[in-house]
Image (cartoon, rainbow, N blue to C red):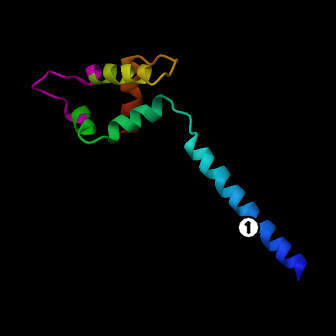
Amino acid sequence: MYQQQQESAQDCLNQTQWQGTMANRWSNTEINSMVVIIDWLTKEGNYNGWHGGDRQNDTTKMGIANEISQIIKDKGITLERQGQDIHVKITHLE
């Protein structure tokens, strides 16, 4: 019986360690340009702005793509993404 309790306790410990490992994997997700793009697109109003543009302020998709490029730089991502690259990535997501 003692052996069974010991094995059961070890199983619980293993499961807890596994859950902690999985949580750490998600919390330590590396930020990259695609994460920034998707984050930007999913904020309220941004996708509509991308899709329809802001006619009053004469905002184009390239203008928005250049803004997102700057956000990527501000996040500390060292591989530079030009506005054209961002435009292509978003187009492929659609």
Tell me where the magenta segment starts and ends, as one range.
Answer: 51-63
| Label 1 neighbour load within 10 Å: few <14, some 14-19, many 20+ | few
- Does residue 57 belong to the magenta stretch? yes
Q: In this view, does 30 lie above or below 1?
A: above
- Does residue 88 belong to the magenta stretch? no
The residue identified by callout 1 is 12
Q: Please tell me which residue is depicted at 51% across the width and 32% down the height of the picture.
A: 31
Which secondary structure lies at badge 1?
helix
Can you give x and y, in whole percent of width and height, for residue 7 in the image?
84, 72
Q: In this view, does 70 lie above or below 42?
A: above
Front-most of 75 and 60?
75
* In this picture, residue 81 sits left or right of residue 62: right
Can you give x and y, in whole percent of width and height, for residue 91 in the image?
36, 32
Q: Please tell me which residue is depicted at 65% across the width and 53% down the height of the picture.
A: 20
Can you give x and y, in whole percent of width and height, for residue 11 in the image?
77, 67
Q: Is the magenta stretch mostly helix, strand or loop?
A: loop
Q: Which amino acid does label 1 sit on?
A: Cys
- Name, please, the residue furthest toward the bottom: 1
* In this picture, residue 15 sits left or right of residue 61: right
